[in-house]
């Protein structure tokens, strides 16, 4: 880059340069260490295992079967999510669709409902004493069973498709309608015009959104365990809990990590390249005409499935429970909120130097850093937990089984969220502002403090909110690393659903959804009005 | 501006932000509603922190003496069953008990991994097999003799390294609307049959079930046990994570029979007298009539004030007060001498379990291997 940047100025004066360099790279190295530690430790553990055990596990037909099941489920969920998201993005972009703003909010809202909460709610709803199941039983029908592949695919798709919807919708809003209109003028039907004119703009977002959902579904533990479908994560969990030698769990975890890395690499290599950003001259706003009614039925019907049924299930069971609030509720709530807050603060603090490095710096090291952070995000919570807890047990026994290890796990998993937010904002801060400050006499540090930082605050806050939200919803890492005697809303929901005590599960479930919804509303506040 | 990245996680950042927001405009406007709302949330979260600290502290003052103020224990027993009695202990002595709940086998594996570095000082297992397994790996310390003599010799380790707290019988819980008692088999092994296909529920990750399988292996040999497990799998026995879930499923008609411990049904009946299920006891001396004990073991590495507190807890759980809690509230068989058994249930002495030394159930590892080999556990 031609113009001087913060990083360039930093290299000018040597002593303060060294300090500034450390200030930027120190946290970066900490993050790299934390992100790679779980995987490295698992490698060591698996290598130390009796070679027969590892080989046997890897070559067993059931392992291959597991691979097929896990990838199969993840692929089905991913493809369904992208298809759903495309349809919904089109519907919400249509100019003659009523209540579009409400529809967008309703469509994104399932992000507030973690998959295992959704699974728990549906189990509660379809239970013979639940609202939907009870109705079906009264009508003489057997309530459908959610256990198995189709139930798992259904629940996972319902509650993770917003991950694909957000980027696809953003891409659609940036898309230029001119190619589409030109194709229509030249006589193409609406579908062909769409494929030729609009789809190229949507392809990268669809692919990336689909990959995100794929990784999410691969790592998912809570929902598949509750719905009793054996995927990698569930097997690792049971290996951990029913084999005296944890090496088995380490080996299967590494297999899962290998899958994740392969998916990431393939996505990078095969993903359609984004076209250069073009100022759109005309926004793409299709007209649905006769399809308005079916579109409404479809989109609002989907919201019934994702929001209304779980809400009804929880309210029903809450009513059955009575108004007495149990003593553990406040403690679980405080731990959830407290952990979210602390993790958000730590991630925000770490995001700042990393974002500066990644946006203003250049070179192979910074690109590698970005990849490492992304790998941490993609790793399943269970694997991170296993790696960190084993490491703590053997190398840092003072913190073993206590909050710092849990916090480290949250940072590894969710730093990418806050970093992405801060990077996005920093990328839009023109370097000319910083240059002007330098010209007017500010030192690099002063420039950072008085010019750059205030502009980054919205990004830091939004990133922090995303992290806090994700921490509160997190289940698999928390289950393994939470100190004895403590619980979060997520672990409470899990435990009670496991025992089929739906009335008790409804309490943390509802709270989780409310808190998550508030956080989500905060994050989405800076969505433009359509 | 960075080109729109195709990297999946980069899209998270682009998905939420609007493209056309002008950053300079941002710096010149007054704080946006987002910023104020965010500040409000931050304040709310900060207020939650003192709540976290205050609500967690024990409510009563302690007369703990030289015992520690707080100890950690691992419990293979379910929280709804033991939390009330532990809370009573906390109130009486002021010692906070932090519990990690989990499956007995999982916690056994964890303890074997952690060894002396474990934060736990006491292990409350759901069955004696797990305790025997820990004993054989030298992780336990003997309990004081005055504690041990409170139960009969059959219900404690000869080495004194674990002591039984409450007794449980394996039963078959069945749905009274769908199954007639005459249809039910005398031996649990007869369930591996065509006519029970898809009607049976079990909990392969549950400690009591695993102890039962160890019993089958001891009585009939590994081969027969393996064949039975594979047959049950073939006939579609349904997996549940917990015994409580099995009983709920039987009551709801999801399955017709379930392999559980006796007391879950009585708890369900206490909550709902119309619950349509009953217990069926296996024929005398059958593996399915196994009487097992939930028990306590002191971990070897516990020392000083923590050990004292652990011994106090063990003593409390063997006291008449806690033992009658088990009899009255959870419908288990109290093992301490001179405490009356649960109402309405056959007395412990009248049961005819198979002739097995409880200590011999310690080959939990072998059972887990068999369960994995027969694909009952993945």
Image: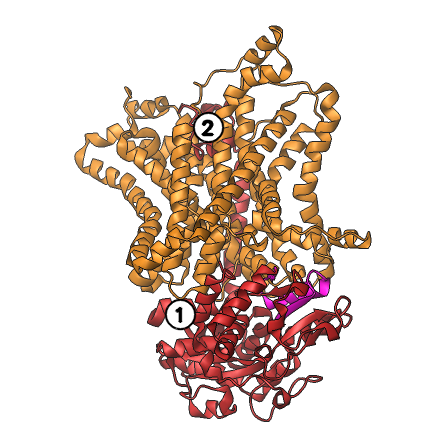
- Give the colouring mode of the picture: by chain
Task: Specify the segment rendered in magenta.
Answer: B236-260
Q: Which residue is mark 2?
A: B27
Q: Which residue is mark 1?
A: B111
Answer left or right for A183 relative to A60: right
Q: Residue B261 versus residue A168: which sits nearer the camera?
A: B261
Chain with orange colouring: A
Is the C-beta separation of discs 2 and 1 under 8 Å?
Answer: no
Q: Residue B47 versus residue B102: which sits nearer the camera?
A: B102
Image point 63% across, 69% down: which residue? B191
Q: Earlier in the sequence, mark 2 or mark 1?
A: 2
Chain with red colouring: B
Marks 2/1 same chain = yes
Image point 57% across, 64% down: which residue? B231
Answer left or right for A384 relative to A81: left
Q: Nearer the viewer, mark 2 or mark 1?
A: 1
To which chain does the residue with label 2 belong?
B
């Amino acid at each position: 880059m031609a113009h001087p940047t913060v990083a360039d100025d930093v290299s000018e004066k040597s002593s303060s340069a060294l300090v500034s360099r450390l200030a930027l790279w120190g946290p970066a190295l900490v993050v790299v260490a934390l992100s790679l530690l779980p995987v490295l430790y698992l490698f060591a553990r698996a290598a130390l295992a009796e070679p027969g055990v590892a080989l046997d596990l890897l070559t067993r037909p059931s392992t291959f079967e597991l691979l097929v099941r896990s990838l199969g489920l993840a692929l089905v969920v991913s493809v369904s999510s992208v298809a759903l998201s495309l349809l919904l993005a089109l519907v919400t972009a249509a100019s003659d669709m009523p209540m579009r703003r409400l529809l967008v909010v309703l469509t994104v809202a399932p992000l507030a409902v973690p998959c295992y909460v959704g699974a728990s709610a549906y189990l509660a709803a379809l239970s013979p004493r639940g609202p939907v199941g009870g109705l079906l039983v009264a009508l003489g029908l057997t309530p459908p069973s959610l256990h198995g592949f189709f139930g798992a695919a259904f629940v996972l798709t319902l509650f993770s498709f917003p991950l694909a919807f957000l980027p696809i919708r953003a891409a659609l809003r940036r898309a230029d309608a001119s190619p589409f209109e030109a194709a229509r003028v030249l006589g193409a039907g609406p579908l062909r015009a769409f494929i030729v004119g609009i789809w190229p703009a949507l392809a990268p977002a669809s692919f990336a959104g689909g990959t995100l959902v794929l990784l999410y579904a691969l790592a998912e533990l809570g929902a598949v365990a509750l719905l009793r479908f054996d995927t990698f994560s569930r097997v690792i969990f049971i290996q951990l809990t029913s084999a005296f030698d944890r090496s088995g769990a380490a080996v299967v975890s590494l297999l899962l990590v290998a899958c994740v890395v392969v998916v990431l690499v393939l996505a990078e290599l095969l993903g359609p390249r984004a076209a250069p950003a073009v100022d759109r001259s005309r926004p793409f706003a299709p007209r649905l005409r006769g399809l308005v009614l079916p579109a409404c039925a479809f989109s609002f019907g989907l919201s019934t499935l994702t929001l209304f049924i779980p809400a009804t299930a929880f309210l029903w069971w809450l009513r059955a429970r009575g108004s007495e609030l149990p003593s553990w509720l406040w403690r679980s709530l405080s731990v959830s909120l407290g952990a979210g807050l602390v993790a958000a603060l730590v991630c925000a603090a770490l995001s700042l130097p990393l974002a500066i490095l990644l946006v203003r710096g250049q070179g192979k090291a910074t690109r590698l850093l970005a990849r490492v952070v992304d790998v941490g995000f993609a790793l399943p919570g269970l694997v991170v937990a296993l790696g960190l807890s084993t490491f703590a047990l053997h190398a840092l026994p003072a913190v073993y089984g206590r909050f710092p290890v849990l916090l480290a796990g949250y940072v590894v998993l969710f730093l990418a969220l806050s970093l992405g937010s801060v990077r996005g904002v920093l990328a839009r801060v023109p370097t000319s502002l910083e240059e002007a400050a330098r010209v007017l006499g500010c030192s690099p540090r002063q420039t950072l403090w008085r010019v750059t930082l205030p502009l980054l605050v919205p990004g830091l806050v939004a990133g922090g909110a995303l992290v806090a939200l994700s921490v509160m919803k997190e289940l698999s890492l928390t289950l393994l690393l939470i100190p004895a005697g403590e619980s979060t809303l997520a672990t409470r929901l899990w435990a009670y659903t496991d025992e089929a005590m739906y009335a008790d599960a409804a309490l943390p479930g509802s709270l989780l959804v409310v808190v998550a919804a508030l956080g989500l509303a905060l994050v989405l506040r800076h969505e433009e009005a359509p | 501006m960075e080109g729109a990245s195709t990297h999946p996680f980069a899209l998270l950042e682009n998905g939420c932000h609007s493209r056309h927001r002008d950053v300079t405009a941002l710096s010149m406007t007054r704080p946006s509603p987002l910023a104020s709302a965010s500040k409000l949330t931050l304040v709310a979260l900060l207020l939650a922190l003192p709540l976290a600290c205050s609500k967690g502290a024990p409510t009563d003052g302690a007369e703990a003496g030289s015992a520690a103020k707080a100890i950690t224990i691992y419990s293979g027993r379910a929280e709804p069953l033991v939390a009330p009695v532990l809370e009573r202990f906390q109130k009486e002595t002021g010692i906070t008990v932090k519990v990690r709940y989990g499956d007995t086998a999982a916690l056994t594996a964890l303890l074997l991994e952690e060894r002396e570095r474990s934060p736990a000082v006491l292990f409350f297992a759901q069955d004696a097999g797990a305790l025997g397994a820990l004993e054989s790996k030298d992780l336990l310390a003997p309990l004081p003799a005055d504690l041990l003599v409170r139960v009969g010799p059959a219900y404690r380790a000869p080495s004194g390294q674990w002591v039984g707290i409450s007794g449980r019988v394996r039963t078959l819980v069945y749905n009274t609307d769908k199954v007639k008692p005459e249809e039910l088999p005398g031996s649990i092994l007869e369930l591996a049959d065509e006519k029970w296909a898809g009607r049976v529920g079990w909990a392969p990750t549950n400690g009591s079930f695993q102890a039962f399988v160890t019993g089958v292996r001891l009585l009939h040999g590994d081969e027969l046990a393996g064949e039975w497990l594979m047959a049950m799998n073939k006939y579609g026995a349904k997996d549940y994570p917990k015994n409580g879930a099995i009983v709920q499923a039987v009551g709801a008609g999801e399955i017709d029979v379930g392999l559980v411990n006796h007391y879950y049904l009585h708890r369900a009946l206490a909550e709902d007298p119309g619950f349509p299920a009953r217990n069926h006891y296996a024929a005398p001396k059958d593996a399915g009539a196994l009487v097992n004990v939930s028990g306590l073991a002191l971990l070897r590495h516990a020392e000083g004030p923590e050990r004292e507190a652990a011994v106090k807890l063990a003593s409390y759980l063997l006291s008449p007060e806690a033992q009658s809690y088990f009899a009255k509230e959870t419908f288990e068989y109290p093992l301490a001498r001179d405490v009356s058994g649960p109402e309405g249930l056959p007395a412990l002495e009248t049961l005819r379990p198979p002739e097995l030394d409880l200590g011999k159930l310690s080959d939990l590892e072998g059972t887990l291997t068999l369960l994995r080999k027969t694909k009952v556990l993945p």
